[in-house]
Image (spheres, grey):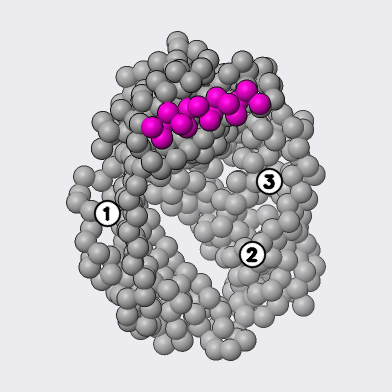
């Protein structure tokens, strides 16, 4: 498989040269995915997809264009290159565009050490259906559950190869296996929904289907009878399932594209405190068997461990080659790309420093406030950091869960929220973003 897509990328580069491109890079992705959905004890849907996607980016006199296709015939690739060069000649000139210098490219990468592809055979559809059925049955065994909205199991295997006219050529394969279940408690307007989903690189590492169904049911049953919480200023505890969204807002704010446009509330915070001084935010793209790991970035640069925040202080911007040049900085090897678009800065695996206490300890510490387990929609102003999101979860009084809540809004100012977060110690090791539950004092709640 990898030999085939490597050959395709080289063919695309040859076609680009013949069409008149000054430089080019090509991405080929070959994948297989299989998903099974079960409902009410019966097979509801089965899907299988196989195919190859091709992407070509050409550079002509400081201009670029991208084209993509799923047809691997030689004549199609020649047409792709011709069209891409014609498009590039009409595009605006940008002096920051260009491939990496050859001496900066990833060489002799130890892809095997990342362990991203499960050597086990692809699971049979009957195996996935059995997983989905068992997850659904386990959820329905909970007397508080009135129905299961969906139970699913899936598998995918995806190989990619990136090649460029600067001499880079590299690729790898990754797999994932998943089980999920969505359970509902109550009836009519009193219905409440919650879920559990688990995904692993290796099938052998995946929790059993019954565990997934039972957890989805327990979560949904606990939400029965939810009502609006009080309105006012209260502490909010972000559950570990959703706490990574807060760190995601920080990563979006330090993305080089936002900084170059001046469209970020963090644009003046380089070298300034953005988290408590006890916390660091570390990216490690080389964690074995983790979804966000990668040996090189979307421009062929070697990836490396990096601190985005160290002891609370912001260390740098997330950059690809173009945004780095716009800002007069080097790329941080964070380019990501698909087959139909040029590279853009993106962060993979990140870990936030854990706290010393459990989630229950933070619940006790917060006294009276809101434990948020689900977020709905968002209004985030990227320029000012003003934050507002719909939420549901549980009202806490005197450190104890009092009742489930829904239909409320939590609001605050992201820079202030992040500087006063208090982490728990419950981050899960298998996630790409290891972020524990986070307690934020003094947020505004709009409820009853």
Q: Is residue 417 left or right of residue 290?
A: right
Q: Nearer the viewer, residue 417 or 86?
A: 86
Which residue is label 1 attached to? Answer: 203
The span from disc 1 to disc 2 (Cα, nearest Å) is: 31 Å
Depicted 334 relative to depicted 228: above or below:
above
Q: Earlier in the sequence, mark 1 or mark 2?
A: 1
Disc 1 element: helix
| Residue 200, percent from left and from top | 35, 52
The span from disc 3 to disc 2 (Cα, nearest Å) is: 20 Å
Q: Residue at x 53, y 57 (%)?
A: 240
Image quadrant containing the C terminus:
bottom right
Q: Residue at x 65, y 74 (%)?
A: 406
* Contact (Cβ within 8 Å) of mark 1 with mark 3: no
Q: Earlier in the sequence, mark 3 or mark 2?
A: 2
Depicted 152 relative to depicted 272: above or below:
below
| Residue 82, percent from left and from top | 50, 27
Depicted 296 relative to depicted 400: above or below:
above
Q: Residue at x 55, y 24 (%)?
A: 85
- Residue interval drawn in magenta: 75-90
| Residue 138, percent from left and from top | 34, 77
Magenta stretch contains residue 77 = yes
The rendered magenta stretch, by its main secondary structure, is classed as helix
Q: Earlier in the sequence, mark 1 or mark 3?
A: 1
Instruction: Name the disc covering residue 418, or none.
Output: 3
Q: Nearer the viewer, residue 9 or 300?
A: 9
Q: Which quadrant of the figure has residue 10?
A: top left
Label 1 environment density (alpha carbons within 10 Å; few <14, some 14–19, many ≥20): some
Which residue is label 2 attached to? Answer: 376
Examine the rendering and report whether any part of residue 164 can be seen. no
Nearer the observer: mark 3 or 2; the answer is 2
Q: Residue at x 35, y 31 (%)?
A: 74
Q: Nearer the viewer, residue 393 or 279?
A: 393
């Amino acid at each position: 498989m990898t030999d085939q897509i490597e050959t395709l990328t080289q063919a695309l580069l040859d076609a680009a040269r013949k069409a008149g491109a000054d430089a080019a890079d090509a991405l080929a992705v070959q994948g297989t995915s299989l998903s099974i959905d079960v409902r009410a004890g019966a097979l509801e849907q089965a899907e299988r997809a196989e195919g190859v996607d091709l992407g070509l980016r050409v550079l002509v006199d400081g201009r670029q264009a991208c084209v993509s296709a799923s047809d691997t015939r030689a004549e199609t690739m020649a047409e792709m290159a011709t069209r891409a060069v014609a498009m590039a000649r009409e595009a605006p000139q940008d002096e920051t565009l260009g491939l990496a210098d050859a001496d900066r490219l990833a060489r002799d990468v130890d892809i095997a050490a990342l362990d991203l592809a499960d050597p086990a055979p692809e699971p049979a559809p009957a195996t996935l259906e059995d997983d989905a059925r068992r997850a659904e049955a386990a959820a329905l065994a909970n007397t508080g559950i009135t129905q299961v909205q969906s139970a699913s199991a899936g598998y995918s295997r995806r190989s990619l190869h990136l090649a460029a006219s600067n001499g880079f050529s590299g690729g790898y394969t990754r797999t994932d296996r998943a089980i999920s279940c969505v359970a509902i408690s109550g009836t009519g307007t009193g219905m409440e929904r919650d879920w559990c989903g688990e995904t692993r690189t290796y099938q052998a590492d995946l929790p059993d289907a019954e565990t997934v169904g039972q957890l989805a049911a327990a979560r949904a049953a606990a939400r029965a009878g939810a009502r609006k919480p009080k309105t006012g200023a209260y502490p909010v505890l972000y559950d570990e399932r959703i706490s990574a969204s807060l760190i995601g807002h920080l990563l979006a704010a330090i993305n080089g594209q936002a900084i170059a446009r001046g469209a970020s509330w963090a644009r003046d915070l380089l070298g300034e405190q953005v988290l408590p001084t006890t916390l660091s935010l570390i990216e490690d793209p080389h964690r074995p068997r983790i979804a966000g790991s990668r040996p090189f970035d979307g421009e062929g640069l070697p990836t490396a461990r990096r601190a985005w925040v160290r002891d609370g202080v912001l260390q740098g911007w997330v950059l690809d080659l173009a945004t780095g040049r716009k800002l007069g900085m080097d790329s941080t090897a964070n380019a990501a790309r698909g087959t139909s678009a040029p590279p853009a800065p993106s962060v993979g695996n990140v870990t936030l420093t854990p706290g010393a206490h459990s989630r229950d300890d933070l619940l006790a510490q917060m006294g009276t406030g809101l434990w948020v387990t689900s977020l709905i929609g968002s209004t985030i102003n990227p320029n000012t950091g003003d934050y507002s999101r719909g939420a549901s979860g549980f009202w806490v009084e005197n450190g104890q869960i009092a009742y489930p809540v829904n239909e409320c809004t939590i609001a605050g100012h992201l820079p202030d929220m992040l500087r006063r977060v208090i982490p728990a110690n419950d981050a899960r090791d298998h996630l790409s973003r290891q972020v524990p539950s986070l307690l934020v004092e003094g947020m505004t709640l709009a409820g009853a």
